[in-house]
Image: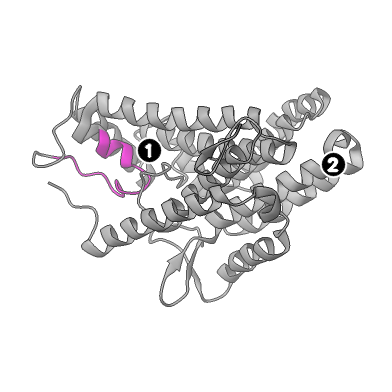
Amino acid sequence: MISYLTTNEYKKQLVAVALGMIAAMVLSALDYRKFVKLWFLYGPACMILSLLLFTPLGFGREGSNNVNWLDLGFISIQPSEFLKLAFILTFALHLSKVDDKINQPIQLLLLLLHAALPIGVIFIQNDYGTVAVFIFIVAIMLYSAGISFKYIAAVLVALPALAAAAWFFVLGPTHKNRILVLFNPDLDTTAGDQQAAGKIALGSGQLFGKGLFGGEYYYVPDAHNDFILSYIGQTLGFVGCMITIGVLGYICLKILANAHIARDNLGKYICMGVFALMLIHCFINVGMVLGVMPVIGVPLPFISDGGTAMLSMYVAIGFVMSTYSHSDKGYAVFYDKT
């Protein structure tokens, strides 16, 4: 059996899960409306952590051009994971303040500037995977707030030109190769080799897999991180993969359902932001393993290794639980509303 994690890494992951569950329960009991108003505390704090990546404290994974990890001495964290949550809360508050004025050009411009600040910081880090996640979150939250179709149509018309500009003036050779390998699997790239190994491992488990313990497992680089689905395919087979995707899909649908019973637009926008976060993470991660999406370092929620990502996902669920427990149709913490 191939061991991807050391004993310390297992402990780190278990601690992150435990802290995440506690955080989710505590947040579910708090009124999200009061917490969101503290944006002047958590918003700047998350931005400062992200800016510290441009100091000697910032570093990237071996073989990656991204500088998205922060060494605090006693612990290493990924600030962008917390920045996503802070952005969802602050953007939801901004949208709720704008309300039905969203389609006024000045108000929409201010919303886009709000989104551009964190996206710009992440972009400078060369973390284009997280940039894609942010853009999707912005799009879904704006759509849920009732942005006019004329703006959507304008973006769709401009999309080919934006894609061409990104290809020629933004993406470097490494990022281009990660896209080209999708159309030419024989292209000699690390990402291509990883995807090829991932697809072989994914299919090697066949219907029911080789089991969690014992067996000849196919090695996949970073299988415990972004390619965890390939390991699930090996050990639990097609059935295990479908159950995993089904559970994650149910979580996304449940969050979407909670958005419809939120007591106000603020709660609705928070749920839609978390829904977008979960959905795009699942979509990109599964697509990477299947070889239909470029390898851009997006983990599978609640499953991939990474203490910061694990904790942030539980915190995100905690905010959704808060909107539910404080909705007119929900329940208040441990007792039903009447």
Task: Residue 225 in the image: state x and y as whole percent.
Answer: 35, 49
Of mark 1 and mark 2, the one earlier in the sequence is 2
Task: Residue 134 in the image: state x and y as whole percent.
Answer: 62, 45
98 left or right, relative to 16: right
Residue 236, by quadrant, is top left
Please identify, in this view, whether the residue under mark 1 or under mark 2 is nearer the observer: 2
The magenta stretch is: 217-232
Q: Residue 221: say if magenta.
A: yes
Measure the C-alpha gap from mark 1 to mark 2: 48 Å
Q: Residue 188: say if magenta.
A: no
Q: Amino acid at mark 1?
A: Leu
Q: Which secondary structure is most common in the magenta stretch?
A: loop
Residue 293 can be seen, yes or no: no
Q: Residue at x 26, y 44 (%)?
A: 220
Q: Say which residue label 1 marks.
A: 187
Say which of 105 and 203 sits in front: 105
187 over 20 or under it: above or below: above
Q: Residue at x 62, y 67 (%)?
A: 51
Q: Amino acid at mark 2?
A: Val
12 left or right, relative to 38: left
Q: Secondary structure at mark 1?
A: loop
Residue at the outermost front position: 338
Residue 264, by quadrant, is top right
Task: Residue 305 in the image: state x and y as whole percent.
Answer: 35, 51
Colour scheme in the image?
A: one colour
334 over 23 or under it: above or below: above
Residue 135 can be seen, yes or no: yes
- Quadrant of image for the C terminus: top right
Q: Say which residue label 2 marks.
A: 98
Mark 1 nearby-residue class (10 Å; few <14, some 14–19, many ≥20): some
185 over 295 or under it: above or below: above
